Image (tube, grey):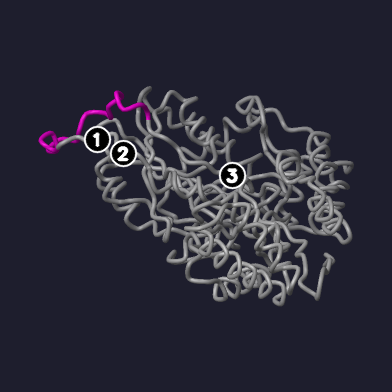
């Protein structure tokens, strides 16, 4: 259990991080043991069969492909679809860089579409205007645990005979919802900072059985990742888990931060999935050890655990000042994988929070906004019947809202591990910080705001 360092008259520093590892020591040790176990072909087939059964509810009977990671499944899908070179893929304009790099690796063109910060839905009016004769697919990502409305996306895709790629890497919530069965492929991730992590692994559900069978056949040609490679990841994650979650390590990290040593960037760099040679590194089948961990962890999924995450995040949200903008508050479904807020001066906001003992962060994920091609690179020819329409200008195509979100987002350390009384304390800190920032907006400096927060903390 994490400890609390108190200062002054009981105004506590909060030793919680914006990033969590949703696991336990016992699961980490189980994963390590599986790397030393002998797995027969029969064992491996059993793990795959168990995963396929878990991932085939009546609400979505599409075939299931467990794989090394989401990138592996997406790359396989693009290989099998083999779209003509220069075809356009419309993508919601916030995603990890690797997804757009994969599109470009297959000689396809990324066309970003802006999103609404309140709902995280894509701008459907803009998306419809982005469809050209070269458009072959739409990729939409559910961000931060928020689930967007797929109906207009699917309707547009059906209207123009486009493939739908549903990226659910950040919104796993059990097996009652495993993506829309009408999506051509749905992708789930179980990387180190995802819900129900198995320290790697991904699952794809593929609508077209022929496409699935071709993907499966190609997948079986890949070499199998060695258990030793998986073990290296586990041995790296055990100390990281301790640092994030096991007292007294979080308090020690907090003390080092107070002395000017901030380890967050180093920690997060260890959590990156494929820092180099992506194509080479993703074209593997998962090891039997990884499959066994995926099967165990996912079979043990407890909806109540996710409900606690949601209850605590909603409680924190209800106590925040109206002046603090929270991302995705109007989304239809919110599982709160992360708790992002958008502020005018994110670095100053983080510094003021730190002065009052709250450890927020800007670089908790690999998400970034996707820029369109240069202004002199036009989209493909317009659809038949739309030749008379004025083409979109570079200004109309640019994802300004997504750029603003990424440039101003801050991730709050709010999750199921934080006690309610500390959530109250953190919300109180946010109210104080927002008032302090408002107070110095016209007549003050950034340094003054930070010093004001330190003074307030010392007197409470």
Depth order, front residue of 458/97 = 458
The answer to the question of whether label 1 and label 3 lie on touching residues, with beta carbons closer than 8 A, is no
- Name the element at disc 1: loop
**Which one is earlier in the sequence, the residue at label 2 or at label 3?**
3
Q: Is residue 86 left or right of residue 67?
A: left
Residue at coordinates 43% horizontally, 43% vertically from top-left? 93
Whether residue 374 is situated above or below residue 179 in the rendered picture: above
- Name the element at disc 3: strand
Whether residue 103 is situated above or below residue 352 in the rendered picture: above
The Cα–Cα distance between marks 2 and 3, rounded to whole angstroms, is 35 Å
Which residue lies most toward the front here? 443
Does 376 lie within the magenta span? Answer: yes
> Quadrant location of the N terminus?
bottom right
Depth order, front residue of 93/217 = 93
The Cα–Cα distance between marks 2 and 1, rounded to whole angstroms, is 6 Å
Residue at coordinates 61% horizontally, 74% vertically from top-left? 311
**Which one is earlier in the sequence, the residue at label 1 or at label 3?**
3
Residue 103, image x and y in percent? Answer: 46, 31
Residue 265, image x and y in percent? Answer: 71, 42
Q: Is residue 325 left or right of residue 51?
A: left
Depth order, front residue of 437/159 = 437
Depth order, front residue of 31/376 = 376
Marking on residue 137: none
The answer to the question of whether label 2 and label 1 lie on touching residues, with beta carbons closer than 8 A, is yes
> Quadrant location of the C terminus?
bottom right
- Name the element at disc 2: helix
Q: Within 10 angstroms of label 2, few (less than 14), some, or many (20 or more) residues?
A: many
Marking on residue 393: 1
Q: What residue sits right under mark 3 in the picture? A: 65
- Is there any visible trace of residue 1 in the rendered image? no
Q: What residue sits right under mark 2 in the picture? A: 397
Magenta residue span: 373-389
């Amino acid at each position: 259990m994490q400890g609390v360092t108190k200062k002054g008259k009981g105004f506590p520093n909060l030793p919680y991080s914006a990033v969590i590892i949703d696991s336990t020591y016992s699961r980490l040790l189980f994963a390590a043991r599986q790397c030393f176990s002998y797995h027969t072909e029969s064992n491996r087939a059993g793990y795959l069969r168990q995963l396929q059964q878990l991932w085939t509810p009546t609400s979505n009977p599409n075939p299931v492909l467990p794989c090394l990671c989401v990138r592996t499944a997406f790359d396989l899908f693009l290989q099998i679809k083999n779209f003509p070179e220069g075809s356009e893929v419309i993508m919601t304009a916030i995603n990890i860089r690797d997804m757009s790099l994969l599109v470009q690796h297959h000689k396809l063109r990324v066309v970003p579409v802006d999103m609404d910060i309140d709902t995280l839905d894509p701008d459907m009016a803009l998306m419809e205007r982005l469809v050209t004769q070269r458009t072959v697919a739409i990729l939409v990502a559910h961000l931060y645990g928020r689930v967007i409305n797929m109906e207009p996306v699917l309707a547009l895709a059906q209207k123009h005979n486009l493939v739908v790629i549903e990226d659910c890497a950040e919104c796993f919530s059990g097996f009652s919802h495993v993506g829309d069965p009408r999506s051509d492929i749905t992708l789930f991730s179980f990387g180190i900072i995802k819900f129900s992590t198995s320290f790697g692994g991904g699952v794809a559900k593929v609508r077209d059985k022929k496409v699935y069978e071709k993907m499966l056949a190609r997948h079986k040609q890949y070499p199998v990742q060695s258990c030793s490679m998986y073990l290296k990841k586990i041995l790296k994650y055990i100390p990281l888990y301790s640092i994030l979650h096991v007292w007294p390590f979080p308090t020690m990290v907090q003390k080092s931060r107070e002395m000017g040593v901030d380890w967050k960037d180093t920690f997060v760099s260890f959590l990156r999935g494929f820092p180099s040679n992506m194509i080479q590194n993703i074209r593997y089948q998962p090891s039997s050890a990884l499959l066994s961990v995926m099967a165990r962890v996912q079979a043990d999924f407890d909806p109540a655990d996710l409900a606690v995450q949601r209850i605590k995040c909603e409680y924190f949200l209800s106590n925040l000042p109206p002046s603090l903008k929270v991302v995705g508050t109007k989304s239809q479904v919110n599982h709160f994988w992360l708790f992002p807020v958008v502020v005018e001066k994110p670095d100053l906001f983080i510094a003021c929070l730190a002065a009052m003992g709250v450890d927020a962060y800007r670089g908790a994920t690999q998400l970034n906004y996707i820029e369109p091609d240069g202004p002199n690179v036009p989209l493909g020819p317009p659809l038949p019947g739309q030749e008379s329409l004025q083409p979109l200008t570079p200004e109309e195509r640019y994802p300004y809202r997504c750029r603003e979100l990424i440039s101003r987002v801050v991730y709050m350390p709010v999750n199921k591990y934080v006690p309610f009384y500390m959530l109250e304390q953190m919300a109180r800190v946010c109210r104080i910080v927002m008032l302090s920032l408002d107070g110095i907006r016209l007549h003050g400096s950034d340094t003054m705001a930070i010093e004001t927060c330190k003074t307030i903390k010392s007197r409470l």
